[in-house]
Amino acid sequence: MQDNILEIHNLVTSFASDGRKDRAIAVNGVDIAIPKGSTVGLVGESGCGKSVTSLSAMGLLPDNGRVESGEAIFCGRDLLKLPDRELRKIRGNRISMIFQEPMTSLNPVIPVGKQVSEALRLHGGMDKETAKRKSIEILERVGVPEARRRYDNYPHQLSGGLRQRVMIGMAMALKPDLLIADEPTTALDVSIEAQILRLMRTLQRESGMSILMITHNLGVVAEICDEVYVMYAGEVVEHADVYALFRDCAHPYTRGLIASLPRMTPKGQRLYTIRGTVPNLRAMPAGCRFAPRCERACKRCWEEKPLLQDIGNGHLCRCHAPVGTNGNGGEGNG
Amino acid sequence: MGKYITKRVLVTIPVLLGIILLIFYMLNVVPGDPVTVMMKEHLKEDVIENLRRTMHLDDPFFLRYLRYVWDALRGDLGVSWKLNRSVTALIATAFPYTLRLAVAAALFSWIMGIPVGILSAVKKNSLMDHLSMGLSLFGVSMPVFWVALILQNTFKGVLPVSGANSWQCYILPTVVLGWSSAGRIARLTRSNLLEVMRNDYIRTARSKGLSPLRVISRHALKNALIPVITVMAIQISSLLSGAVITESVFAIPGVGSLAVSAINNRDMPLLQGTVIFTAVLIIAGNLVADVLYSVIDPRIRVE
């Protein structure tokens, strides 16, 4: 217990939309624990609630979002109950975030160096000159060439990869205990992605921070994560360490995700796809939320909601008929 | 930067020539012979002939246009038919009144408009927001002459309602003229700020732990005010060229009143002069807006 830097318990987050009275539940009872010093992946397709989970914990939900219940324990304090003032002392200081789109996540009218030094001045209490010197050091550290000159550049003058390095520098400025990276490489091309992931790993080794890596890319997960949570339609459906997940994934959804990765297979084979789309947040199936798309779904799956159960060695799975057991459905061809 | 400004200035030259050509042509085809306008009572043949010659009225159109442009370049906009004084001098006399009113109205509209817009955006959908947006809409939509008459009626006896011989005279016209500008600026500030607040970089700023006040003042406002500043620069140039209706209603002897009297008197050179003066100011306003834009928004800056 005490080894976790952040523990999210039973988080429920809802969103209001225009002209409707009922609120859509985007995150429905999520439990996540991030051990100190490790990298935890949070995987799922767009709209499954993975970003909302992290934004809820940080108190950064948009105006129409609201945390309904749950807790997010960081160093013994529940972030969800902290007054905004206290939460602001943690944000950017002990927990930092990196976002997906480095172009829109940096302020277009403020030089990038200033954006890095801002957090230093706010939380580190540095004066302007010290913060500037420190920021240039940080920019060099995250691999921005000619950092002194780049300090005065505006975001549009940098490439996507450099912008993401600046974002990382900004997030790492105060050596946070936890870095939440929300799809940090999705907008970058593959070679840059590898560089950025390597950089994050190096920085993690140096500082011993924990990382929550939010992604839909299983390649990134395999590259960098120690353990993984798989989310589907606002719920965690599987949790395991990264080796167990790729070797013996138990949930049909996870298996579908892994199966749909392109591989070095003989020519002529079609890539696997999961049929159908994510169910509407306001019209969730009564039983298992994945049942309408599942090849193994049986009557029970449609009627009874499965619970997240330990299927051995701390491997959790939310399924009546996990892969590898004698399920009621067909075997599929994953 | 200097290169950019030079380029922008050079572009204005053909625009200005085109505007002069258009005005010159339009006033040329308007019915009514200048000489008849000038000397209604004594119409002797030889006098008319003589005048037409000295005024070059029989020359071809294009020659007269070129002559006018050449004179205008040297600051000579011709002589008023009615008042028999140099148009340039008449505008120079009237302009200080217009300038005072324009500056006062512009300041009024900025000091009211921007803070009200920011507050409305921050307190979106509150009573304050609805009230100030209602007042803004009212200011934007009400005809100026109507607001002017209502205010004159309401404040007669308390404030001077016409003339321009003391600073108090400017209070009502400033409110009348500034109200609609203030409304426009408030609405624009509000909608821009709300839009900017939805951006990813605002979330980044908040994720750094900045207070809501700093997020707005350091990260949102600069982005939100870029379009507002453009509107402000263009607005002040149109205010400077004379608020025709406001000046007439409040009997302020500015450029607007001058234009009205020129129309009433069929005083073509004077009308031509005031219109060209207006055009120059508006072109200059646009130029200033463009330059300001590139100063504030680094993305526009030409490398």
Image (cartoon, rainbow, N blue to C red):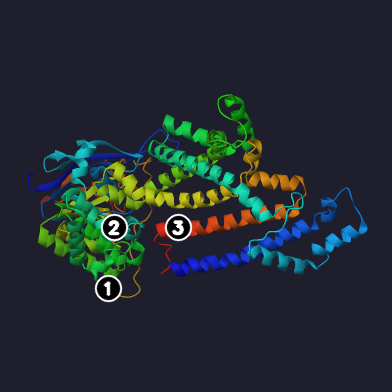
Q: Around disc 2, counting alpha carbons within 10 Å, would you say few (fewer than 14), some (14 to 19), or many (20 or more)?
A: many
State the residue position of label 2.
Answer: A216
Q: Around disc 1, counting alpha carbons within 10 Å, would you say few (fewer than 14), some (14 to 19), or many (20 or more)?
A: few
Sequence-first disc among 1 and 2: 2
The picture places residue B275, in percent across and down from the top left corner, at: 67, 54
Quadrant of the image occupied by residue B146: top right
Closer to us: mark 1 or mark 2? 2
Residue B33 visible, this orientation: no
User: Residue B186: which disc?
Assistant: none
State the residue position of label 3.
Answer: B293
User: Chain letter of disc 3?
Assistant: B
Closer to us: mark 2 or mark 3? 3
Name the element at disc 3: helix
Quadrant of the image occupied by residue A62: top left
- The image shows residue A127, relative to residue B107, as above or below, that is below
What residue sits 31% from the left and 46% below the top?
B215
- The image shows residue B15, relative to residue B153, as above or below, that is below
Q: How far apart are marks 1 and 2 (CA)?
A: 21 Å
> As shown in the figure, which amino acid type bears the numbered disc 2?
His
User: Chain letter of disc 1?
Assistant: A
Left or right of B133 on screen, residue A85: left
Q: Which of the pair A258/A134 is nearer the observer?
A: A134
State the residue position of label 1.
Answer: A264
The picture places residue B74, in percent across and down from the top left corner, at: 63, 64
Q: Quadrant of the C terminus of chain A?
A: bottom left
What residue sits 71% from the left and 53% below the top?
B85
Left or right of B287 on screen, residue A44: left
Residue B182 visible, this orientation: yes
Q: Which of the pair B118/B160 is nearer the observer?
A: B160
Name the element at disc 1: loop
